[in-house]
Amino acid sequence: MTAAIRLGTRASALAVAQSRWVADRITAALGRPVELVEITTEGDVVAHSLTQIGGTGVFVNALRSALREGRIDVAVHSLKDLPTQPAAGVVIAAVPAREDPRDVVVARDGLTLAELPPGSRVGTGSPRRAAQVHALGLGLEIVDIRGNVDTRIGKVRSGTYDAVVLARAGLARLDRLVEATEVLDPLQMLPAPGQGALAVETRDGADLAGELGVLDDPGSRAAVTAERAVLARLEGGCAAPVGALAEVAEGEDAEELWVRAVALSPDGTLAVRMSATGDPADALGVGDRLAGLMLDEGAGQLTDNQPITPHEPPVTDCERQEA
């Protein structure tokens, strides 16, 4: 009898749904059974905001430790949760086809953000979302929120908050898209780098790493590689909220990678917003060059709300704080 592949997952409903989605595709592609193994992470047991407990990595480290120790064979992450620096001993074996990466609003009475009265309370745990909502100039009050999808939407249903902002992909994977009252155009709110995509990790050098490559979607891989390259470069040059979105589209002669990104001051009053195009095969380079141009235009100064002066040397020691 073929041994089951042990797939590590967080215990939340969304994490389990994502993991089951991947497990079904592993079984279909490799003909092997998959067993889900629940792993508790720091982000699941600590009640503080994500910015207080370390931002990226809080949902990831326990799964990676279980991989390295051989307690599981595969881990599934929301790709936006992964730190941009490579992790020793593990490899992203596949980035499956990406869900719609946009953000959505779940608001009382079926309202959109623009329809909410000034002073309405909007919940989000993401500095990126908060800054971009502020930038819309709607006079909304941003309040921090933690918890799973049920908890966050429950705050709206109970009247504690007037609205929350969530990733569309999460609602789609939970079959709850009907609860969204607005899908936000990327012109209003660029998503987090990697949002909507999953990372399928396994031990570096394991036979399974090559086998899982059948799940990889080249377009999704190129897009998130470019977005994460933007973030990685800006992490070394600013502490501002960052959004990025890349797409592979048909060009005149061949496929083309288009990347747009924004870095904002926390209150949304200042922003550096730029875009770039290039070869999907050079996704890392396209994203890195775009971030370099943004730093040249003052992205590194945004965290302190300083006037933007092009071509100033960037500051350093940025920590990403995206929920």
Image (cartoon, rainbow, N blue to C red):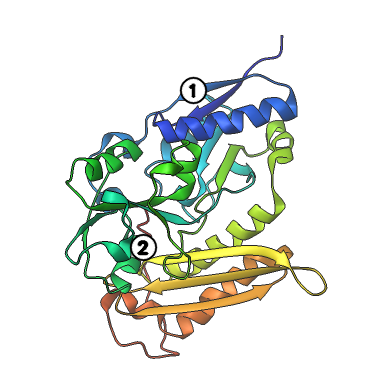
* 59 left or right, relative to 94: left
User: Measuring 71% from the left and 14% from the top, which residue is drawn there?
Assistant: 2
In the rendered image, residue 23, in percent from the top left (x then y), is placed at: 60, 28
Residue 213 seen in render: yes
Which residue does the image show at 46% across and 60% down from the upper left? Answer: 191
Residue 266 figure quarter: bottom left
Sequence-first tag of 2 and 1: 1
Residue extending furthest toward the front: 109
Q: Which residue is mark 2?
A: 128
Residue at x-position 35% and y-position 57%: 321
314, 257: nearer the viewer: 257
Asked if 76 appears above or below 251 in the picture, the reply is: above
Residue 50 makes an appearance in the image: no
Mark 1 lies on a secondary structure that is strand
Q: Position of residue 28 (x, y in %)?
A: 71, 27
Q: Amino acid at mark 2?
A: Arg
Spot occupied by residue 16 in the image (x, y as percentages of width and height): 47, 30
Within 10 Å of disc 2 (Cα), the crowding (few <14, some 14-19, many 20+) is: many
Q: List x then y, in percent, for residue 70.
A: 55, 26
Q: Amino acid at mark 1?
A: Val
Tell whether 274 sits left or right of 140. right
Horizontal relation, residue 58 to residue 254: left or right:
left
Q: The N terminus is located in which quarter?
A: top right
| Disc 1 packing (10 Å; few <14; some 14–19; many ≥20) | some
- Residue 38 occupies which quadrant of the picture? top left
Query: Quick check: 138 above or below 172?
Result: below
**Can you say whether 154 is above or below 129 in the image?**
above
Q: Give the numbered dot on residue 10.
A: none
Marks 2, 1: nearer the viewer:
2
What residue sits right under mark 1 in the picture?
37
